[in-house]
Image (cartoon, helix red, strand yellow):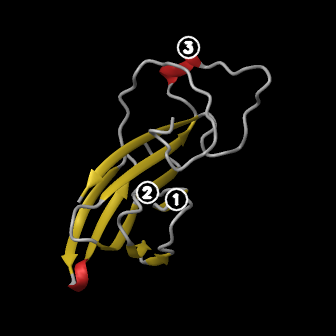
């Protein structure tokens, strides 16, 4: 699971399952700007085509995020423990969010978008089994469906 969640140190229960064709979150770039000293700006509209409850964005440690706003409100441009910039938005509106970023790079920016919905797809019912000594917990990954899209701009 490290390939999917490099920022997490915890262990995950896993089981093989049939592949699903689920709609990934969508990011539509509205505007891009280039400023002095290698600072680029981008404004985008991000939506969940599955009406997911949670949206997460990850930008790798190699790209400094100088400024970020969501729906016009400033959000911290800080890094998590592995050095990547992360934004997690709970109770995602049906029409999505407007994200504006200022990043210090002249090269491409790689972003991972992840939307999380509670519960599993109906076709996963045959794979639902939990060891008897483990109970569900109220955490983001518990009995959830995650769909990820990686994009570059």
Between residue 116 and residue 6, name the one nearer to us: 6
Relative horizontal placement of residue 103, taking residue 146 as reference (left or right): left
Tell me: 56 left or right of 65: right
Q: Is residue 72 above or below residue 26?
A: below
Considering every residue shown, the one lying at the far right of the view is 133
Q: Could you say where residue 111 lies in the image, as x and y percent from the top left?
A: 34, 56
| Badge 3: residue crowd in 10 Å (few <14, some 14–19, many ≥20) | few
Circle 2: element type: strand
Q: Provide the residue designation for mark 3.
A: 126
Q: Give the structural element (helix, strand or loop) at label 1.
A: strand
Q: Which mark is residue 57?
A: 2
Label 2, residues with CA under 10 Å away: few <14, some 14-19, many ≥20: some
Q: Nearer the viewer, mark 2 or mark 3?
A: 2
Q: Position of residue 149 (x, y in %)?
A: 35, 45
Q: CA distance from mark 2 to mark 3?
A: 31 Å
Labels 2 and 1 touching (C-beta < 8 A): yes
Give the quadrant of the C terminus: bottom left
Q: Residue furthest bottom?
A: 36
Looking at the rendering, which quadrant does residue 66 occupy?
Answer: bottom left
Element at label 3: helix
Mark-to-mark CA distance, 2 and 1: 7 Å
Q: CA distance from mark 3 to mark 1?
A: 31 Å
Q: Earlier in the sequence, mark 2 or mark 1?
A: 2
The answer to which of marks 3 and 1 sits earlier in the sequence is: 1
Q: Is residue 7 above or below residue 40?
A: above
Q: Position of residue 12 (x, y in %)?
A: 61, 33
Which residue in the protein does label 1 denote?
88
- The residue sitting at 73% across, 39% down in the picture is 137
Q: Sequence-wise, which precedes: disc 2 or disc 3?
A: 2
């Amino acid at each position: 699971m490290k390939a999917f969640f490099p920022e997490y140190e915890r262990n995950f229960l896993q089981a093989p399952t049939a592949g699903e064709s689920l709609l990934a979150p969508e990011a539509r770039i509205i505007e891009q700007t280039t400023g002095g000293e290698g600072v680029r700006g981008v404004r985008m509209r991000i939506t969940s085509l599955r009406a997911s409850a949670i949206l997460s964005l990850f930008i790798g440690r190699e790209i400094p995020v100088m400024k970020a706003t969501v729906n016009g409100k400033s959000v911290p441009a800080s890094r998590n423990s592995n050095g990547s910039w992360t934004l997690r938005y709970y109770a995602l509106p049906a029409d999505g969010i407007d994200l504006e970023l200022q990043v210090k790079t002249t090269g491409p920016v790689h972003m991972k978008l992840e939307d999380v919905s509670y519960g599993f797809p109906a076709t996963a019912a045959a794979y639902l089994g939990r060891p008897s000594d483990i109970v569900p917990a109220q955490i983001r990954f518990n009995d959830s469906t995650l769909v990820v899209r990686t994009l570059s701009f």
